[in-house]
Amino acid sequence: MKEKFRFLLNRLKEKLWLKPLIICVFSIVAALLARTADSVLSEKEMMDLLPQITKESIEDLLKITAASMLVIATFAVASMVSAYASAGSTATPRALSVVIADDVSQNALSTFVGVFIFSIVALVALKNGYYEKAGRLVLFTLTLTALAIVIVTFLRWVDRIARLGRMGTVIDKVEAATFDSLMRRATCPGMQGVVVDKDEPNGIPVYAKEIGYLQHIDIERLQSLAKQQNIHIAISGLPGIFVSPERALAFVYHDQNNAKKTLELAPILKTFTIGQDRLFDNDPRFGVIVLSEIASRALSPAVNDPGTAIDVIGTLVRLFLQYSDARLTKNKPPRFNRVFVPELRIHDMFDDAFIPMSRDGAGFFEVQLRLQKALCSLASSGDDAMKNAALHHARRAFAQAEKAIDIQDEINLIKSAGLLK
């Protein structure tokens, strides 16, 4: 249930309306609860000790706050939309989900809208005599506190929004999302199930009923169903694959003493979440693909920015080395022995990362040089699978560089920089 909850929570984080809605509810509650001070401090002696806050002063303050918050909230939305458009056009549209999920921007918008709602509700209540002396004091204190929060939030948000749509920020956010996904897969290669080869077993297929990308698999629920029906379940594809009704999501096979029992496949099918888009959560290859797309766009003739491609190469090296280290040292034993999951192959991730980059950057000496050095670093990680994949892509990239670069000295430098020297 923990993985399912995390998956659903990440989907909610991508909704721009959620945090503003929550803050608005709290704002309304805070504005109305200020009146409880009138009943708590109802004794005359206590009332005399309180400072006198006039209704007019609070009313003017709330009017100013409401008017300014509406303007700032509108400005915030326009700035965020501009940053999202910039991120989609300069990097890749596939990175938009991690940019939208930016906590600082969402918190800022939520604060501005929440204080606006608070001001409106409090102003209406104040004009209708809802507060007495103690209530007005609490309301005045809450309003000043809200303004202080707005000032701090605004200053922090301005610093963030200035960078939100920039290439470096987008790369960092994609790297962070990919890192989380890779580390979860490194420590639990089978997503807490038993890791097997990709060969599909002979069993009863469970076919998809939708067309789209596999986004999430509830392994814990599959284990429970397998125990209930005394069966084993072999998943045929990892999150990120494109599925259609003729594609089997899993294969089910009986235990020897249970071969004639009729199976219920519908509950098994419900454990697979299929959507229109690939997601970063459980799909490490998608994060690698997005980074590779950013590099390919930077290497296009229209952009001609090899520096960004070099930055992406460094990011990929960092991710792969961290993944390799965690895979070799932090691997946890499987929790669910009745669910079999195919392994995430390093060769596939290297294909996603380096094939487009070596092709689009074939004519860039600096990119090819950095790519050979990066693959050399990956080959020295101590991971045999990574070493083989790095050597394969070093040869492939060098072959493309030989065809695209005419200067022999540059070709010699590229060859001597990496695994081919």
Image: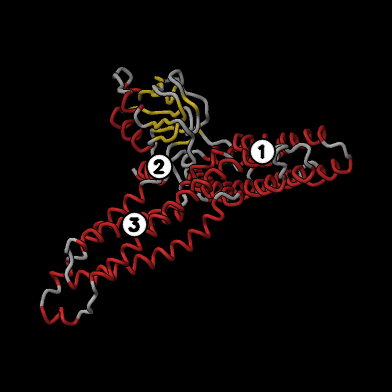
Q: Quarter of the image for the C terminus: give it.
A: top right
x and y percentages locating residue 229 in the rendered image: 29, 27
x and y percentages locating residue 247 in the rendered image: 46, 21
Residue 248 occupies quadrant: top left
- Callout 2 amino acid: Arg
- Callout 1 amino acid: Ser
Q: What kind of element bears circle 2?
A: helix
Looking at marks 2 and 3 on the same chain, the residue that comes earlier in the sequence is marked by 2
The label on residue 11 is 2
Instruction: Kindly tell me whether residue 353 is visible in this rendering.
Output: yes
x and y percentages locating residue 201 in the rendered image: 46, 23
Front residue of 175/40: it is 40
Q: Residue at x 41, y 54 (%)?
A: 73
The label on residue 296 is 1
The label on residue 116 is 3
Front residue of 239/312: it is 312
Front residue of 363/115: it is 115
x and y percentages locating residue 167 in the rendered image: 61, 48
Left-right relation of 322 to 273 = right
Q: Rate crowding at label 3 as few (under 14), some (14 to 19) or many (20 or more) other CA atoms within 10 Å.
A: many
